[in-house]
Image (cartoon, rainbow, N blue to C red):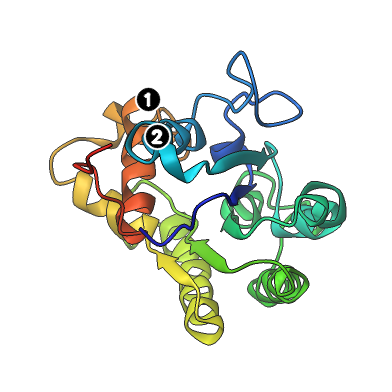
């Protein structure tokens, strides 16, 4: 597996990462939330208990990439995580459609790219494993205006992953595979926020890119 022993794995993002986490984002009583971060934590704890990987959820509902820049120094830097996963961009796009007249609420592709570059540069001193996950819209129709726009932002993530040697997780492509078998309503009520099946699928999609061994003997 690509995560090393005795390291921290911080997940940085919006509501898809948040999923009802408590303020600290780790600890007792489902403090990590009930989304894909919790599933990742459970997989690591049961298949790699000897690795002692500390999983920290720092997702906040409604955040854009601009918000992640603003809270980097409080929510990421103090932890100095060796492993950093960034999944952001959904709200950067969504605000262009649900509040189109409030143009200051969204982030253009240019700002989005600049914000991700800023976070990556600031993480360079302590992050050994950078994981960049594409934003997504759980919709097969690539002509849908929001899906098409989201694909533009996903392309930016791919470009930055290649530029910085990060692990690239194409979550949009992963959803398209699953939609061959299920309608989006089985996975999510709004084509953004996954239910328990969707969260588990996200966790497995990410862990697969980290060469996770589900049959590892402990």
Q: Nearer the viewer, residue 7 or 183?
A: 7
Which SS class for mark 1? helix
Q: Position of residue 154 (x, y in %)?
A: 47, 67
Residue 80 occupies quadrant: bottom right
In the rendered view of the protein, which quadrant contains the C terminus? top left
Residue 140 in view of the camera: no
User: Up-down: is 34 above or below 126?
Assistant: above
Residue at 65 percent of width and 66 percent of height: 127
Q: Which residue is mark 2?
A: 199
Q: Position of residue 109 (x, y in %)?
A: 63, 73
Question: What whole-number distance in Å separates the C-alpha atoms at marks 2 and 1?
Answer: 5 Å
Identify the residue at the far top of this view: 29
Residue at 32 percent of width and 62 percent of height: 142
Callout 2 touching callout 1 (CB < 8 Å): yes
Q: Is residue 164 left or right of residue 167?
A: right
User: Up-down: is 132 above or below 48?
Assistant: below
Q: Nearer the viewer, residue 110 or 13?
A: 13
Q: Is residue 127 left or right of residue 161?
A: right
Q: Which mark is residue 196?
A: 1
Q: Position of residue 94 (x, y in %)?
A: 59, 50
Residue at 71 percent of width and 67 percent of height: 126
Q: Is residue 137 left or right of residue 183?
A: right
Which SS class for mark 2? helix
Q: Residues within 10 Å of mark 1 (few under 14, many from 20)?
A: some
Q: Which mark is residue 54?
A: none
Q: Is residue 110 left or right of residue 184?
A: right
Residue 80 in view of the camera: yes
Residue at 22 percent of width and 40 percent of height: 217
């Amino acid at each position: 597996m690509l995560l090393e022993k005795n390291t921290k794995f911080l997940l940085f993002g919006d509501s898809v990462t948040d999923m009802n986490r408590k303020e600290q984002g780790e600890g007792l009583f489902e403090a990590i939330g009930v989304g894909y971060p919790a599933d990742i934590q459970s997989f690591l704890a049961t298949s790699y208990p000897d690795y002692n990987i500390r999983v920290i959820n720092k997702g906040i509902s409604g955040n854009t990439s601009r918000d992640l820049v603003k809270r980097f120094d409080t929510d990421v830097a103090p932890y100095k995580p060796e492993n950093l996963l960034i999944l952001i961009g959904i709200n950067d796009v969504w605000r262009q459609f649900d509040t189109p007249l409030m143009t200051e609420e969204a982030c253009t592709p240019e700002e989005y790219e600049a914000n991700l570059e800023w976070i990556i540069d600031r993480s360079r001193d302590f992050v050994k494993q950078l994981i960049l996950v594409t934003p997504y819209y759980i919709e097969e129709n690539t002509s849908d205006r929001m899906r098409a726009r989201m694909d533009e932002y996903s392309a930016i993530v791919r470009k930055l992953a290649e530029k910085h040697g990060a692990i690239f997780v194409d979550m949009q492509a992963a959803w398209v595979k699953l939609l061959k078998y299920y309608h989006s309503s089985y996975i999510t009520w709004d084509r953004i926020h996954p239910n328990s099946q969707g969260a588990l699928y996200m966790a497995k999609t990410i862990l697969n890119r980290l060469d996770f061994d589900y049959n590892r003997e402990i």
